[in-house]
Amino acid sequence: MGRVPLPLVAGFALFVAAIAGIVAASVSRPAVPAYAPTARWIARAPGGVDTVTLDARDESRWVFFDLAEGRTLAPPDTAGWDVAVRRFHVIVADAAANLGAADFDAIAAAPGSG
């Protein structure tokens, strides 16, 4: 019986290391940033940033938000909602404006119609 070629042993070792890396990556939990839901909408916050964080973790419950009032709405009283989110789904009330192909940073205001 002859000796096993060194390149074959090295290739097999790299293969085993790659498989071990894939298995280790599949069982580890990624570090996902989490943000606490905000209680109220802050209209024109300092620095010109308008941000609200909604808790959309529940896959079976929609979270409705009213932009004019700046608050979340709880069913069954959801009249006047503008945006609703559920896990990975987002819907808007009425019609969303289609601005076409535009640079996001160049949009300063909503269109007057549509």
Image (cartoon, helix red, strand yellow):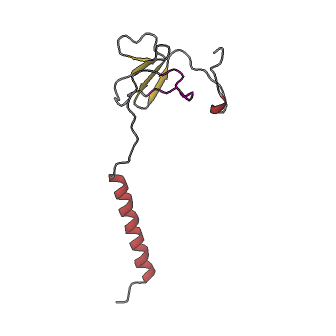
- For the residue pair 39 and 91, the one nearer the viewer reads as 39
- Residue 77 sits above or below residue 107 on the image: above
Residue at the image position 35 percent from the left and 11 percent from the top: 76
Residue 66 or 8: which is nearer the viewer?
Answer: 66
- 51 relative to 67, above or below: below
Tell me if residue 78 comes above or below residue 35 in the rendering: above
Q: Let me know if residue 22 is in the magenta part.
A: no
Residues drawn in magenta: 42-52
**Residue furthest left in the image:** 27
Q: Residue at 35% of width from left, 14% of height from top?
A: 75
x and y, in percent, of residue 68 in the image = 50, 14
| In the image, farthest residue toward the bottom | 1
Residue 97 in which image quadrant: top right
Dominant SS in magenta:
loop
The location of residue 40, given as percent across then percent down, is 42, 20
Query: Residue 111 is drawn in which quadrant?
Result: top right
Position of residue 24 in the picture relative to residue 106 (left or right): left
Near-viewer residue (93 or 112): 112
Residue 44: which quarter of the image? top right
